[in-house]
Amino acid sequence: MLHNLIFIVFLFYTAMLFVIAWFTSRKSDTESYFTGNRKSPWPVVAYGMIGASLSGVTFISIPGWVGSTNFTYLMVVFGYFFGYVAITYLLLPLYYRLNLVSIYSYLGERFGRFSYKTGASFFLISRTIGASFRMFLVINVLQLFIFDRWGIPFWITTLLFTVLITLYTFKAGIKTIVWTDLLQTTFMLASLVITILVVSDDLKLSLSQLVHRVQEAGYTQIIDNEWRSDRFYLKQFFSGMFITIVMTGLDQDMMQKNLSCRNLKDAQKNMLSLGALLIPVNLLFLFLGASLYVYATDFGIELPKLSDDLFPVLAFGHLGAVLAVVFLIGLIAAAYSSADGAITALTTSFMIDILGHRTDEKLPDKKKKNIRYKTHFFISSLIILTIVLFREINDQAVISRLFTIAGYTYGPLLGLFAFGMFTRLKVHDQLVPIVAIVAPVISILISNYSTYLFNGYKFGFEILIVNGILTFIGLLFIKKNNK
């Protein structure tokens, strides 16, 4: 009975998104898809980007992660804020000054065609993997609690979920996403708060008493002083800062929403507001995770093998039918919010950066739409394939895997943009792809053997910074000797 109710809620929620898509896609054109006609109100963008920044990864992985890392993730979140400050005053002025649609076209202007294609390619790889990981979490929950009971294979569930996202975004793109994100962030945060209240009520504790129980259980440790640990607080802080710079500031998905604002000042307000809001929101997710562990302990519930399964197992098996529905709505909201933007951004980058399509080309709008529709469905198909393959290898917390891969794939982007913005040097453009491949390979070797090379030091997410530095050094080796 419960799985039927969950499926009905899933369909109802999806229908709401299609209604918003219908309203926002009226009188839309190709410019609406790419930039939202640069008319998006910044408060709407900032609030909606909370859901896009957090995604289903945060919704499931962060609560489960508390069991092994306590609140140490909060140091990463503090780093996020300073990353948003850097984006606000370094990257956004550059993007608006050049009037960019795809942010990677900057690399073409600064270095040349090979650098441009390299940057765009690394984004396409990074975002395809990242979006697939995020979507996998939600699809896997739907599979376990609904579609397995009906004998429907995982790949069909994946196809259904991805096709629904594709259909409601393919016409108006970013113009639709700005407004669907508003709805989805609201549902995600409401689900978070309601879950905490239900857990508190079931434990017969007030919120202040629940806070005290979480502290007593030892989950609130924020600072890890062991410098060899991959949770060392300075490593966490600087990793968070640079993760934000690359996964937001150098990411077409996140920047495309910012570039849809009316002007630079609005986009800057959006970034600073988002950075400030994410601190209390992430703290709530950590508190939720600790509360769930306290709940499992008090009621003698066996913990699942994978920490990512903690929240869904308790929501569907122990917290009642109402909370199961609330959990699902929040999870779907978080997943849709990140997945729809990713598909749109990947479509934009593939069309502009790889296929060489320019938004100002004097082509009939019908032909432009035809190219865009084909690209949109191609990207969706690629994500479906990646999700199905990922299910075969998933064996750890998705957020950990996501940040690890980001360290290797976004590192070259960090190095390229830093070199372009902070030096006036030119490079041998045709050698840039070699540098962008060699730097991550060296980073992987350093990470794997760090305990032997650096007296027990273990790399965490800060491998991203190392990767960026190696890329920067590699570009110095291939600089042109101009007067």
Image: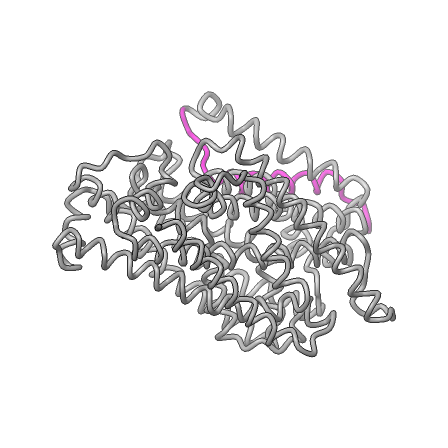
Q: Position of residue 6 (x, y in %)?
A: 40, 54
Front residue of this view, candidates 60 and 385: 385
Q: Tell me, what colour scheme is on the image? A: one colour
Point out the stretch of residues depicted in magenta: 456-483
Q: Is residue 284 above or below residue 273?
A: above
Front residue of this view, candidates 267 and 295: 295
Q: Position of residue 299 (x, y in %)?
A: 17, 41
Tell me what residue is drawn at x 30 percent, y 53 percent: 321
Tell me what residue is drawn at x 35 percent, y 31 percent: 305
Q: Is residue 101 above or below residue 393?
A: below
Quarter of the view holding residue 32: bottom right
The answer to whether residue 479 is left or right of residue 284 is: right
Q: Is residue 32 above or below residue 162?
A: below
Quarter of the view holding residue 341: bottom right
Residue 481 magenta? yes
Q: Position of residue 430 (x, y in %)?
A: 82, 42
How many numbered dots are placed on residues in this image? 0
Tell me what residue is drawn at x 52 percent, y 60 percent: 86
Residue 51 magenta? no
The answer to whether residue 58 is left or right of residue 304 is: right
Q: Position of residue 219 (x, y in %)?
A: 24, 44
Tell me what residue is drawn at x 37 percent, y 40 percent: 309
Front residue of this view, candidates 290 and 450: 290
